[in-house]
Image (tube, coloured by chain):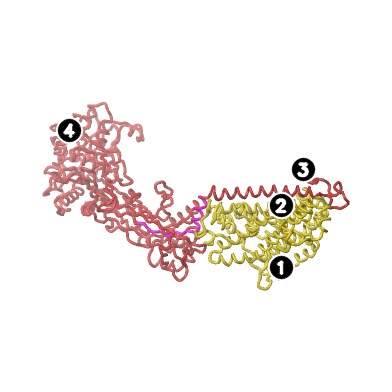
Amino acid sequence: MIRNLLGNPFGTPGKKNRKGGRESAAITKARMQVRVVILGVLVAVIFAVLISRLWYLQILSSDDFTVSAEQTYTREVKVPAQRGMIYDRDGEVLVDNVPGLNVTVVPSAIEREKLGELAGILEADEDRVLGLYDAAMESGSLHSPILVKEEAGRDAVTYVSERTREYPGLSINDDYTRNYPVGETAAHVLGYTGAITEEELAREDYEGFDNDAIVGKSGVELEYESLLHGTPGAEVYNVDAQGRIVGEDQQLDAMGRVAGGENEEGEPPDPELAERIEEPVPGRDLTLTVDLDLQQTVEEELDEALVRAREEGYDGQAGAALVMDPEDGEVLAMASRPDFDPQLFVGGITGAEEQEEYEYLTSEEAGSPFSNRAVSGTYPAASTFKAFTGMAGLAFDAIDPSSTFTDTGECWRPRGATEGCWQSWRQFLDTGTNHGTQDYEDALADSNDKFFYEVADLIWNGTSDPNLLPEFYERFGFGQRTGVDLGSEEAGRVPDREWQQEAGQTEEDRYWSVGRWVNLSIGQGDLLVTPLQLARSYAALENGGTLVTPHVAREAGARGGGDTEDLTPEPAGSVEFTQQEISSTVDGLRAVTEPGGTAVAAFEGSPLSVIGKTGTGEMGERDPVGWFVGWAEAQEEPVVVLVMVEGAGGDQVAAPAVRGILEARHTGEESPGSDVTPVPTESAGRAAGAPAEDNAGEPPAAPAG
Amino acid sequence: MSLSRSQTRVAIPREGAASWLRFGDPVLLLAGLGLTAFGIFAMYVAGADDGQSYALDQLVGFVVGLAVAVPLALVDYKYLKRYLWWIYAAAVASLVFVLVFGAAAGGAQRWIFLGPIQVQPSEFVKTMMVIVLAGYVADHYAGNSATFLRSLALISLPALLVFAQPDLGTALVFGAVFLVVAFIGGAKLWQLGALLALGAALSALAVRLGILADYQVARLTAFISPESSSDYGYQVVQSQNAIGSGGLTGKGLGEATLGNLGFLPEDQTDFIFSNVAERLGFVGSIILLVLFFVLIWRILHISTMARDRFGLLLAAGLGTIFLFHASVNLGMAMGIMPVTGIPLPFISYGRSSLVVSVISLGILQSIAMRSRAESSRQLGA
């Protein structure tokens, strides 16, 4: 049929169809008409396709194309948002913002090589900038500007702005830069800020952040990033293909900076021409629990303690100090040494001087200045731990407050042991004296090692639970993070049988014995605590057993009213003890600073009655660590003060600093400082030797023996 | 409707022009007027501040076209057949003249100046070649290979001259016209198939040998992956952005659009549809598509109703020009056809194109009138 109608399209030409002798007769008009109809079908198909496509574009995908079109013909001029300010508890400014110039660049507009060159001119971190560039190229977000240099210098800005053609996509924005008016003070609490990195951009909690964002890198700047961070706004302009703002003869580059012409400085466009304006949302302010005055005192006292340590021949470079409200865990001051100036990082590490400083700070020699030793340094608690051993002895009925132990200078051994020799500091420091007969209170005051060995041994013999003592210590929060609102907190370690079995290198080493307990009883062995943990455990002694959650942030929101948010955390838990247990322990701790106590020299003549404990932790090959932790009695607003100095003894280095801080806090007077008469005490030469790091099941080789 | 009868009727003495007129095709007339009006409106919109002058230009084009189209409609189209070789000679001569004396713009030499008026002869040559080809094939059986090759040779000369301007898009129109006229004229499918295969082989060779410039190849392939190829890909992407963002009802006339902000390339000529679709949305665009469909459908209808082979082939050939232009231009704007740079009849800015379109409609009316006259006479006889 079709063949017939089409005039035999497959036939041999010219023969069968020859009808009237004329070629044209080979196809009839009717067949031609059929062929026109076939063409008509083709037309219908073509229009069906066109209409389907139109439907797809304008109905089905319209939203996508609308977004895409809008991106094409709008330009945004960023309106910077201020990062939240940080105040101390009384409203003193700790961190604020100052106007500065930021240089950004649009990745799609500039070549990699040119960008590297630009980074060099602006003294920016080339690796970071190129890293962001590569990430932008990979992710396809080519049109979103990346931060080349925060707080660019005027000279550099002038230089590059005269060469906008050489560095296309360049933009210089008025922005805010971070300012740390108190310098190094509380640097570890405040932390520092810097340009966002590609790793951070990839993180979920940084979603929606701009490529050129400034974010916190440590301290509360990091911890409260989401709160402090502002959201920049934008003025959105319609522009034509040449980048001219519609209705105005002004040209914007892909980034929103007014470009070209005589106007190299780049006057901002008139906001009245903006198609729409997205208001910036400033970050929220943060009020800390820190008291700036007290913080400064603490820093000074810590520095003086380090000086004393160096005078005694120790290394004396590192330490930490903190003041905490025992009732609610508010940290009133926290310092760590060595330290740094957060301002160094504002605008990146720029210039030879800053570069040199940064290189020093990150060198081994500098001793990790960015580490906040108050929360991330872990040390043996040493004699400060004896209070908890005593509490355990009372709680497990191994001793009562009147129980005594007599030291005659003989070696002490656990019951049933025939070898080994444990001595106390009076023997191995060769003081020529013994502790004599002491009860619990005396033993705390005199830091009698042998008394607490005996307590641990008695508990060991009274129980079948090999972890009874370690678990008692854990009740006071040791071995767990305190939950302080500062990053990089360490948990420390309370060794128990399971840990020993896992950590031990040899068969002998894995053995859990009474010897481990004995070493633990004086805060040695494998015990590690952070200064903050220790301060919190003493706070629990002070406040009757509440295990607070230490924290440095108090309130978010504008100061002086408005929408504020209380940031005070709930306490972490509580410790139960009897009145007798706590009062005899506190009596012993009070005697530490009284005549006959190990810290009497440091507190001689003080108007305050100080309850506390010295400690000198053995660090193996390294210099010991010196502690003093305590509080002043009968104060309306008591505080627990802790000073820790790496490479020093507790009673002559740390204790005077604690006295100074407590007196400044409670009496408003400056401390007598280092004006302390040295007397032979616990710490005086402990570096020379001590109960060595324990050996499983065997008494440590005492230096005396 | 036999050949012999219609031939005898042609000899009947003419009556007054007014009585012929009422036998014209009103649907074709309305579709043509509608498209012209749409085109003038589009110029007014797309031209932004200069919209009025652009619209006026188009209106002038329409009037000029009308001045030629009305007499052509009234005169019996059979007279065109008498001057086939004159028409062919004029077409080829004008193209040679362009190549030698023409004005260049945008890398192509397409225009000549007749006094103050700029004319693009290739637009006229398209229609002229339809007349020539239809006239030839009407008398020679296209299924005959000798005829097939002769008619191919006939159209190849102007096609090559246009290709040399260079104007690949228009050259392709000649190809489409030949395929359709030869097909309807009785060409065998194997002949057409062989021709297409040869064309494909030649194209491949042309790319290989660099006869097709890189930009031509880039343009033709840009729509396949618009993101990857820079400039032409940009055109395709922006065109689709414009159309797609128009949505159902469009952005309106006064709003900022990719078109008036200068992001759309050739926004008054090749990409006029994108421009209009962005402002008028699906509702406006579909009206335009329907107008084109009606126009082409009606032309094919006239073709089937034509009095004789010549009229039939002529109408089909003229319809092919509209079909090819509309489908390739719209397809290009919507990203499903290569960027060939051929205008959208009646809508794209360009007086030559509009004049020729209107003239074509005049010829088509002439064909329609004669067929109607024929049938009414038969009824009356």
| SS at circle 1 | helix
Q: Are marks 2 and 1 in contact (CB under 8 Å)?
A: no
Q: Residues within 10 Å of mark 3 (few under 14, many from 20)?
A: few
User: Which residue lies under the disc numbered 4?
Assistant: A578
Residue A49, above or below A511: below
Q: Residue furthest right?
A: A21
Q: Is residue A33 left or right of residue A612?
A: right
Q: Which chain is red?
A: A
Q: Residue at x 26, y 42 (%)?
A: A549
Q: Which chain is yellow?
A: B
Q: Is residue A505 magenta?
A: no
Q: Is residue B51 visible?
A: yes
Label number found at residue B300? 2
Badge 1: chain ID = B
Q: Does the magenta stretch include residue A69?
A: yes
Q: Do the residues labelled 3 and 2 touch (CB within 8 Å)?
A: no
Which stretch appears magenta?
A: A63-81
